[in-house]
Image (tube, grey):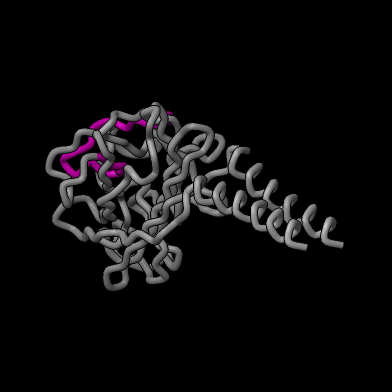
Amino acid sequence: MFGKTRTTVHALALVLLLTVCSGHAFGLLFTGTSGNLAASVEFELVAGNLQVTLTNTSMADVLVPSDVLTGVFFTLAGDPALTSLSAVLTAGSTVFFGGTDPGNVVGGEWAYASGLNGAPRGANQGISSSGLGLFGAATFPGSNLQGPVAVNGMQYGLVSLGDNPATGNAPVTGSNAFIHNSAVFTLGNLPTDFSLHDISNVSFQYGTSLTEPNFPGDTPVVPEPATFVLLGIGIAAFATRRTRKT
């Protein structure tokens, strides 16, 4: 009986270890709120790249441009210049008043930049659908789906989960295309020693000006792969010790 128990527990430990080694993503989630505004951004390591999922999580209706989530700022230790690989809608997201490239690609409407000077809260990196005086041409692969070639205005910003596209002022009821309500961006060329713990100072940007709403993201404690490795080893060691005692 104890041999069978030991085998089962060892198998569980092995599953944990294999999960860590099989390339599964491990994420760091930031969330923030300010009045009716709410957003989240999750950073994940996927196949050696940094995957950034930005979501407008508010259930409130978008009535004016300053309700549109247009960017996320963050600080990366060492301020490395990453490579813009892709920008696509997340599963279940759609575009109001516009379309996408094949594969739900929206990269032609978004830009990534490092080495920022003058970004909110001193951040050195950011991803945005609006110029904000910090971003120029779109950097992600994709067509210019609306408006000028440079990221500008609020086109393809993120409207809330609870948005009614038929209500609000003219700029949010047909003049501009919007993503409802989430997009995922993939960045490559990570430093060899990159860790999710290199990410800090996250904030969410709304509207088309840095004078419009910006608020910080709170950071939960999220275990990294090493934590799961230690857990698996601990389970195996515990099973072996119990078996020897019996």
Q: Is residue 200 above or below residue 220?
A: above
- List the single residue furthest toward the front: 245
Q: Where residue 96 sits in the image (x, y, percent)?
A: 45, 53
Find out whether residue 140 is within the magenta segment.
Answer: yes
In-front residue for pair 153/187 = 187
Find out whether residue 66 is within the magenta segment.
Answer: no
Instruction: Please state the extent of the stretch shown in magenta in the rendering.
Output: 125-142
Q: Residue at x 27, y 34 (%)?
A: 113
In the rendered view of the protein, which quadrant contains the N terminus? Answer: bottom right
Q: Where residue 22 sits in the image (x, y, percent)?
A: 63, 38
In-front residue for pair 133/78 = 78
| Residue 68 visible | yes
- List the single residue furthest toward the right: 1
- Would residue 137 appear left or right of 5 to someone viewing this image? left
Displayed quadrant of residue 171: bottom left
Q: Majority secondary structure of the magenta segment?
A: loop
Q: Residue at x 27, y 73 (%)?
A: 35
- How many marks do you count on the picture? 0
Displayed quadrant of residue 195: top left
Q: Residue at x 35, y 39 (%)?
A: 110
Q: Residue at x 16, y 40 (%)?
A: 133
- Would residue 165 appear left or right of 90 to someone viewing this image? left
